[in-house]
Amino acid sequence: MAAALLTLIACAPAGEDAEGERAFGAAITEPEATRVDAVPQEEPGLARNRWRAVNESARTVTGNLTASLEEGRGGPLALAFANGVTLRGELLTVHDASARVGGQIANFRALLALPSQVDARVYRVIDETVTLSAGQGLCGEARTTSVAAAEFVGEAGRWVLHIAAFRGAVAPGEGGDPGFCGVFGFEQPQ
């Protein structure tokens, strides 16, 4: 009898026991805990550089835009607007869309028309050049001190870039009034 049982066990296919049930390993694997963007988003200026002005502020104040990162990911953001204004910004922080902006603005979602899963990047402006033809910058006669920006896939399925300009001594998201100037909307040209 014992010999017959040993023969039955030996003849069982690999991964099955003598009763024909599948034997599974004791190792339990867990999925990697990485964030998956529900809405595709990217650091502004990294993958897409040329943008078409789509809202009234962008069409009348700035015109189209060329955006780039001077030193790759995390490097200074360079924004060159068609009207002759250029900005260079250093990344200060990344805020969740629900984070409070300051002043009378509830949050970055409301300010930049963001889906709730998209982050806003805040840059301290380290250089702003306004040509004579431009006349004034993103904050009119005042110097632009910071910008909040988000690049993501919008509702229509196209990449969009929304930029808000500020003139205050306090950057958006740091508490206090950041001195909001305006929001400029762009999308990838066809």
Image (tube, grey):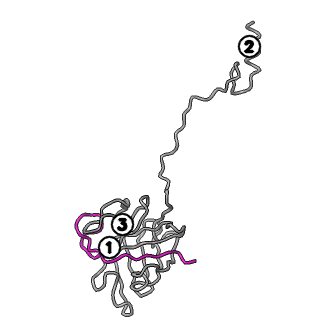
| Relative to 161, residue 8 above or below | above
In reply to whether residue 181 is colored magenta, the answer given is: yes
Which residue type carries mark 1? Answer: Ser
> Going from the N terminus, do you reach mark 2 or mark 1 first?
2
* Residue 2 found in image quarter: top right
| Residue at the disc numbered 3 | 110
Instruction: Give coordinates of residue 111: x percent, y percent.
Output: 35, 69
Name the chief secondary structure element in magenta: loop
Can you tell which mark lies on residue 146?
Answer: 1
Of the 4 image quadrants, the one containing the N terminus is top right
Can you tell which mark lies on residue 30?
Answer: none
Instruction: Give coordinates of residue 145: x percent, y percent.
Output: 30, 75
Q: In 3D space, how far apart are the residues under numbered discs 2 and 3 (Cα atoms)?
A: 71 Å
For the point 48% across and 71% down, which residue is it?
A: 160
Can you tell which mark lies on residue 6?
Answer: 2
Q: In 3D space, how far apart are the residues under numbered discs 2 and 1 (Cα atoms)?
A: 77 Å
> Going from the N terminus, do you reach mark 1 or mark 3 first?
3
Identity of the residue furthest to the bottom in this view = 133
Left or right of 71? Residue 108 is left
Task: Identify the element where label 2 is drawn.
Answer: helix
Q: In 3D space, how far apart are the residues under numbered discs 1 and 3 (Cα atoms)?
A: 18 Å
Instruction: Give coordinates of residue 151: x percent, y percent.
Output: 46, 68
Which residue type carries mark 2? Answer: Leu
Q: Which residues are magenta?
A: 166-190
